[in-house]
Image (cartoon, rainbow, N blue to C red):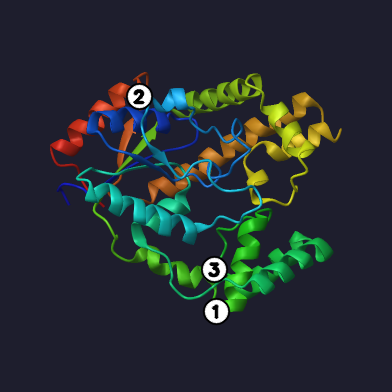
Amino acid sequence: MTSRPDLLVITGPTAVGKTATAVALAKMLDTEVISADSMQVYRVLTIGTAKPTPDELGGVVYHLIDFVDPNYQYNLGDFVSQASQLVEKIQSQGRLPIVCGGTCMYLKGLLHGVFNLPSRDETIRRELSERCVREGLASLYAELQKVDPGANHIMPNDRQRILRALEVYYVTGRPISQLQQQFRRPPRYKAAVFVLNMDREKLYAKIEERVERMLSKGWLQEVKDYLAAGYSLANPAIRALGYHELISYLRGEMTYEEAVLAIKRKTRNFAKRQLTWFRAMKNAIWLDVAERSPAELAQEVFQRVTSGAECI
């Protein structure tokens, strides 16, 4: 469907250059950006989550970053509620909202909605967390496989999503995979979705360069400061890519070189999973980053939108 969109989405695998492109586009459109990144919401951890700096933003208003304490379990429902309000606010100003990020569930939730059954229970969540400590995550993952065989998109080491899926099941009596079928509904918005991508080998090289750059900016010291401040290792913020490996290095469980290699490998694998998600997005417009600058990519998006871009 070709028409003026309600919002723009700039997405793509990690390290492809989404933020810089979204910022350049926001300046062209005189608008604001809403982040769709599940880790950049957290305060304290900045370098390893690749939050944009004030200099990188260049005055562009960039919502939903650096505003949640590390111990808060920020979730899909929180994001969809807050992002939807921001979309409405920006639209009310006569502007076209830009959503930028690579957390696929956040994008799908915003575009298609989330189930509206009450599904949070502090007592059940606390009990599940305590059981995880006593019994181990593998035990709870096996339990999830029994009560919700359809939740095969949840990885065995993804503590947050395993506990959340079990919480939903025990609160609602229904599997989360069933409740998430809302992703098959018609979209809530007419959205022009742009997926930035590049040759896989070049993307992997960019990922490795970014890991090295973040380390040179003081990523390891950021982890040391986090631990010295007494923050818990169970906090959801510490699940961001790379922090576990750097903590393992500080504990003497692996060498620095092993930690860095592991971070790069995990980040490459994460990019693969993201690309699998993006390929399932119907009517998404794929842009080859190649050697183009963020400004050049933003210009192409601008031209496509103003001439009537395909919407989902």
Residue at (28, 29) in percent of width and height: 27
Where is residue 287? Give x, y as percent: 32, 33
Q: Secondary structure at mark 2?
A: helix
Of residues 189 and 186, the one nearer the viewer is 189
Q: How far is the residue under mark 2 from the one under mark 1?
A: 45 Å
Inspect the image, locate mark 1, and give the three-letter code of the amino acid beneath it. Thr
At label 1, counting other C-alpha atoms closer than 10 Å, the crowd grade (few under 14, some 14-19, many 20 or more) is some
Q: Secondary structure at mark 1?
A: helix
Q: Which mark is residue 172?
A: 1
Name above or below for residue 158 compared with residue 200: below
Q: Nearer the N terminus, badge 1 or badge 3?
A: 3
Q: Where on the picture, by quarter, is residue 285?
A: top left
Q: How far is the residue under mark 1 from the one under mark 3?
A: 16 Å
Q: Which residue is mark 2?
A: 294
Name above or below for residue 20 compared with residue 11: above
Q: Which residue is mark 3?
A: 150
Q: How many marks?
A: 3
